[in-house]
Image (cartoon, grey):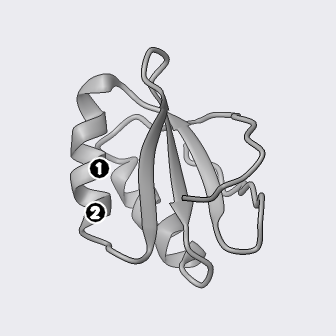
Amino acid sequence: MISNDTTNHDDSMICRYFKVAHRDMVFLKFILEAYEGMNVMSTVDNKSGIIRIAIMPGFVDEMNGLLAELSRDVNMEAAEWHEESCRF
């Protein structure tokens, strides 16, 4: 189940963290890159399979819908990760 919790570390992006299987990371990156300008996905802990999806303001609802759809095919467990900022 995808959580709707968001972590907003600054005024520009909202970061969400998920634990995913390594085999799904490339698939997710490919799909999320198709939504250019809405988000940026990056790996924050490769060993544990933790990814960060930084969502641009104004696209949170759209990304929540997309992530809910993706979670039908990919096991995405909401994860906690603490960073000082969500900047790129």
Residue 68: where, in percent of width, then height? 45, 57
Amino acid type of the residue tagged 2 in the rendering: Glu
Quadrant, the C terminus: bottom right
Amino acid type of the residue tagged 1 in the rendering: Lys
Residue 38: where, in percent of width, then height? 44, 75
Which residue bears the numbered disc 1?
29
For the residues labelled 1 and 2, the Cα–Cα distance comes to 6 Å
Q: Is residue 86 left or right of residue 11?
A: left
Whether 2 is drawn above or below 14: the answer is above
Which residue bears the numbered disc 2?
33
Q: Residue at x 55, y 66 (%)?
A: 55
Q: How many numbered callouts?
A: 2
Q: Residue at x 71, y 57 (%)?
A: 6
Whether 18 is drawn above or below 47: the answer is below
Q: Nearer the viewer, residue 82 or 18?
A: 82
Q: Residue at x 73, y 41 (%)?
A: 83
Q: Residue furthest top?
A: 47
Q: Is residue 5 left or right of residue 19?
A: right
Mark 1 and mark 2 residues within 8 Å of each other at the beta carbon: yes
